[in-house]
DNA sequence: AATTATCCTGCCAAGTTTT
DNA sequence: AAAACTTGGCAGGATAATT
């Protein structure tokens, strides 16, 4: 009888494959369960991955919600870190941001990046890294550091360095490191630093020996690429090795071109990172309001085929276009504020009538009729429902050019989301077609340049493009929405929660609840609000001022709601006088001017650097300067607001003789929350 | 069930910045 | 100076929480 043997097998490629798959999922937003907002950029990711790679996130995710804002790190830095987390590689990072990268890695608890200082100190010609960038003791054997020690490049592990020249790669069991000269001529795009408009990924086959400049150029993220235009600096490729054998020393050249190991016999598929992260507010992205994901542009396409939409549901299981277009009576989950979610019932009907199943995106190449940098894409029915879901990268990889058009097959609607946050999606352009205008890299125009409360004319997207640098700035700053144009009407879609807005100003205001770019602290307590109006209403509760006077009984009320309730219950009338003539004369109330609070035109706190991460009720994490937030705001203190008008306490109270019943404590307020001290002068 | 508090969003006016 | 843009207040409906 044959003896029984115990067989063991190890899949040496599993970890790499797994990581690659995870990265692909990230690029398409698949299963992403956290949105990280850094400056004006949004990064979708998986909590598990981040928490496994970063001690900071590990701790943070135990309490944080699904939307997190990091104020202590630059977007381009975080992008590199995120790319590393999902690829184990650092690709062509400019040397002048290395120190910041390392420090950010230390802050986030990403070991490999945190300890980059040491191996980088082996590279000649690098700008000196500060001492704190080179961790103490990392030169000792990594073997003694226990789990995770592989993330600490150890001096002793260096196999090759500086051999025969300054450009040889450093290859150890734990990592490989290479550097090359940064050249402006490499084709880096002069674009906005935070451009997210690079739409298409590229599949690049590197030269047999190392990586060409062009490859690296393609790999370079936009934001990184944009920084070095005036100060040519080095690009560093640093890649954590899975196995040393994967390392392929790159040719030594006069340009210090060294490439970290590439996968054998593999091409490099690179999605511009800005696209990967920012352009993927994938369906399912949870808003701070815990709404069901609705009205995503992705779902726009899916909805076109009622009979197949179930099968084509976005991978995140988001709701369909129904939730965008349907009236609230439909069984589709809707937001808590349905009235704002439905551009028009007619629009929905238009979509339902088409019954489009799958879409083929035909990108019209730039031509004379188009503005530079602008791709026009048409979606047409291609009727195939069997394609794999591999995200935007694959979709883009399937693009081909026929008849002067760039045809891109989108496997699922989510890929529309993945295209760009600056996209304009034109629905109902023609039968069974949509137009998408995608500002691509270096595209001077974009959809966000439009503002002004929707007061501007609803011009075509191409007409809105503006090449002035100033517009660029605005665009980058406010990359927060898609624009959906249906039946000639434009709707602004929040990229985070997919809410739709008729007025861009409304969206801007709303988006701050995601980004917390501006914070509105109460002057009387330590509460912080995302909307100025909320803060104002809250502060009025502190002051107790009652501005709403019922004209029937002359009672004063603290807000419209209380007044309205009073009028309806006591007088059985609507305060607006709706039952009577629709004019101001019929109003049953009078609104007195605000005495207790002066107008504060720009009374917000914008992104205090650093600070304490605060998690609000919605799970949003934001950072508040401890010097401001911790102690609260006592009456009489200077307001935190950056408003130009400094409100003094004397200004708040009505002086005797004014005749206004302006300021007094609301009976319900008491003094439990706010100690109301009436100045002697009052 | 009624009341209260809070949120939401279109609209608007006023202030600021840009052209 | 005019236009464009930003900010914040208001109305009034909706929803959640509390009584």
Image (tube, coloured by chain):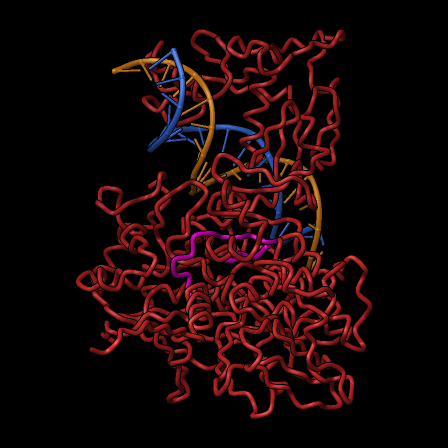
Chain colours: A red, B orange, C blue
From the viewer's side, name the closer residue of A55 and A645: A55
**x and y percent of residue A422 in the render?**
50, 63
Magenta span: A28-45
Q: Residue at x 42, y 87 (%)?
A: A404
Relative height, residue A391 to residue A336 (above, below): below
Which quarter of the image is occupied by the C terminus of chain A?
A: top right
Which quarter of the image is occupied by the N terminus of chain A?
A: bottom left
Relative height, residue B19 to residue A499 (above, below): below
Examine the rendering and report whether any part of residue A310 can be seen.
yes
**x and y percent of residue A3 in the render?**
26, 75
Magenta region includes residue A622: no
Q: Residue at x 40, y 87 (%)?
A: A401
From the viewer's side, name the closer residue of A426 and B7: B7
From the viewer's side, name the closer residue of A91 and A14: A14
**x and y percent of residue A38 in the render?**
59, 54
Relative height, residue A161 to residue A443 (above, below): below
**Quadrant housing residue A577:** top left
């Amino acid at each position: 009888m044959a003896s029984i043997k115990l067989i063991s097998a190890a899949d040496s490629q599993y970890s790499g494959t797994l990581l690659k798959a995870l990265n692909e999922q990230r690029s398409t937003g698949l299963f992403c369960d956290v949105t990280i907002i850094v400056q004006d950029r949004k990064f979708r990711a998986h909590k598990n991955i981040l928490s496994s790679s970063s001690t900071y996130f590990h701790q943070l995710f135990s309490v944080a919600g699904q939307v997190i804002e990091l104020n202590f790190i630059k977007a381009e830095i975080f992008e590199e870190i995120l790319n590393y987390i999902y690829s184990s590689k650092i690709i062509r990072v400019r040397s002048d941001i290395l120190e910041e990268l390392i420090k950010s890695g230390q802050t986030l608890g990403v070991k490999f990046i945190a300890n980059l200082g040491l191996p980088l100190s082996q590279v000649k010609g690098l700008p000196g890294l500060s001492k704190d960038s080179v961790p103490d003791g990392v030169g000792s054997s990594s073997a003694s550091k226990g789990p995770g020690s592989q993330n600490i490049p150890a001096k002793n592990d260096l196999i090759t360095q500086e051999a025969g020249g300054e450009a040889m790669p450093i290859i150890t069991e734990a990592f490989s490191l290479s550097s090359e000269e940064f050249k402006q001529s490499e084709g880096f795009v002069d674009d906005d630093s935070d451009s997210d408009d690079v739409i298409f990924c590229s599949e690049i086959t590197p030269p047999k020996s190392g990586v060409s400049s062009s490859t690296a150029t393609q790999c370079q993220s936009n934001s990184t690429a944009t920084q070095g235009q005036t100060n040519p600096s080095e690009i560093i490729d640093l890649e954590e090795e899975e196995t040393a054998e994967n390392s392929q020393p790159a040719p030594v050249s006069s340009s210090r071109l060294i490439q970290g190991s590439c996968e054998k016999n593999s091409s490099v598929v690179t999605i511009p990172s800005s696209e990967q992260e920012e352009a993927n507010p994938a369906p399912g992205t949870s808003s701070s309001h815990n709404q069901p994901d609705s009205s995503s542009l992705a779902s726009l396409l899916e909805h076109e085929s009622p009979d197949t939409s179930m099968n084509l549901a976005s991978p995140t299981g988001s709701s369909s276009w129904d939730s965008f277009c349907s009236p609230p009576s439909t069984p589709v989950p809707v937001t808590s504020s349905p009235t704002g979610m439905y551009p028009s019932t007619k629009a929905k009907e238009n979509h339902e009538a088409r019954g489009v199943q799958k879409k083929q995106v035909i990108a019209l190449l730039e031509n004379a009729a188009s503005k530079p940098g602008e791709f026009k894409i048409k979606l047409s029915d291609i009727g195939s429902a069997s394609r794999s879901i591999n995200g935007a990268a694959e979709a883009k990889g399937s693009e081909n050019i026929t008849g002067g058009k760039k045809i891109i097959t989108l496997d699922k609607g989510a890929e529309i989301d993945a295209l760009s946050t600056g996209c304009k999606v034109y629905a109902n352009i023609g039968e069974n077609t949509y137009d998408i205008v995608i500002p691509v890299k270096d595209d001077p125009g974009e959809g966000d340049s439009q503002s002004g409360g929707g007061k501007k004319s609803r011009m075509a997207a191409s007409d809105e493009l503006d090449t002035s640098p100033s517009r660029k700035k605005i665009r980058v700053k406010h990359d927060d929405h898609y624009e959906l144009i249906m039946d000639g009407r434009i709707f602004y879609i929040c990229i985070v929660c997919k809410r739709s807005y008729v007025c861009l100003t409304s969206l801007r205001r709303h988006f701050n609840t995601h980004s917390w770019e501006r914070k509105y602290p109460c002057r009387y307590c330590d509460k912080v609000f995302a909307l100025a109006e909320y803060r104002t209403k809250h502060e009025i509760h502190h002051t107790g001022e009652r501005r709403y006077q019922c004209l029937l009984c002359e009672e004063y009320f603290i807000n419209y709601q209380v007044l309205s309730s009073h009028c309806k219950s006591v007088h059985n009338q609507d305060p607006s006088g709706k039952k009577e003539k629709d004019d101001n004369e019929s109003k049953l109330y009078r609104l007195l001017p605000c005495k207790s609070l002066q107008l504060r035109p720009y009374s917000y706190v914008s992104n205090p650097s650093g600070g304490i991460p605060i998690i609000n009720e919605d799970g949003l994490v934001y950072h508040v300067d401890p010097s401001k937030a911790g102690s609260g705001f006592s009456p009489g203190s200077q307001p935190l607001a950056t408003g130009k008008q400094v409100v003094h306490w004397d200004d708040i109270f009505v002086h005797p003789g004014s005749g206004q019943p302006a300021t007094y404590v609301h009976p319900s307020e008491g003094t439990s929350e706010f100690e109301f001290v009436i100045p002697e002068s009052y």
